[in-house]
Amino acid sequence: MGKGNATDRYVKLINSKVLPFIDYDELEKSYGTDMAYAKGVLNLLHESMVRAYGSDVLDETKGDNGFVVIPAIVQGSNKKLSLALLDIDLSSSGEHWGTAFLCRFGVVPQSGDDKEAQSKEWVSGIIPYTYCYTAKIPGDIHVDMGRLPKDIRSILSDFKSYDMKLAGDTLRLVGKSAPAQAHGEPAHEARNETRTPKKSTPER
């Protein structure tokens, strides 16, 4: 993989500017309440995506030979919500290859046997899940807008209004700004499939 591609830039950006500063306990708590902190984190991840890829509209010319890492919201069959980073193959109509969840244990990849027992149990509890990313990917055949859960739709409708600020070494929610433009057509949603991912973690 060559240096300097947009996927690398995104991963390096969030690894240096976002992920280390998240209060993961606060993030987990927000999943069970109003999702305010989670929305603020999702907004930062989305803004970083736009900065790295140059747009929130992604096609197969973007990323690492068509592979991108992008932010998303997922909802498990147990109704649990979680932010996630997805590995998507833009060259195969948006095929989903891997997921890393953001939870109280940090950034936890779905695949791999090196997870501790508690984080492994957490991941097992949310599978299977529905995912919906914040990017716009024209021609994604793995999208079924009719099955988009209400909770995911609600989060995507206003997450851009939630502002975060670095306080010391931790990201804190500043508040809710004026409503951002509705996340209208964007939310690409699909059921996850059990695959052997080519990439399964944002670490590069």
Image: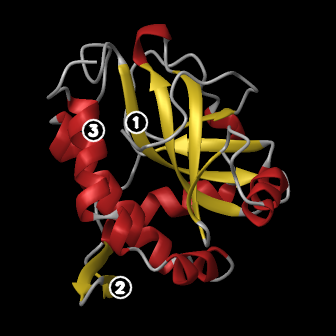
Asked if residue 96 is positioned above or below residue 37 in the image, the reply reads above
Give the color scheme: rainbow, by chain, secondary structure or one colour.
secondary structure
Q: Amino acid at mark 3?
A: Asp
| Residue designated by label 3 | 56
Q: Amino acid at mark 1?
A: Val
Alpha-carbon span between mark 1 and mark 2:
24 Å
For this rendering, which residue is in front, 199 or 158? 199
Whichever of callouts 3 and 1 sits on the residue coming sooner in the sequence is 3
Question: Image quadrant for the N terminus?
Answer: top left
Asked if residue 59 is positioned above or below residue 155 in the image, the reply reads above
Whichever of callouts 1 and 2 sits on the residue coming sooner in the sequence is 1
Identify the residue shown where x is 46% and y is 78%. 37
SS for tag 2? strand
Alpha-carbon span between mark 3 and mark 1:
12 Å
Is there a contact, CB below 8 Å, between mark 1 and mark 2?
no
Instruction: Give me the disc on residue 173.
Output: 2
Asked if residue 101 is positioned above or below residue 41 in the image, the reply reads above
Q: Amino acid at mark 2?
A: Leu
SS for tag 1? strand
Identify the residue shown where x is 67% and y is 57%. 150
Instruction: Give me the disc on residue 69.
Output: 1
Asked if residue 104 is positioned above or below residue 102 in the image, the reply reads below
Question: Image quadrant for the C terminus?
Answer: top left
Q: Quadrant of residue 59?
A: top left
Within-10-Å neighbours for mark 3: few <14, some 14–19, many 20+: some
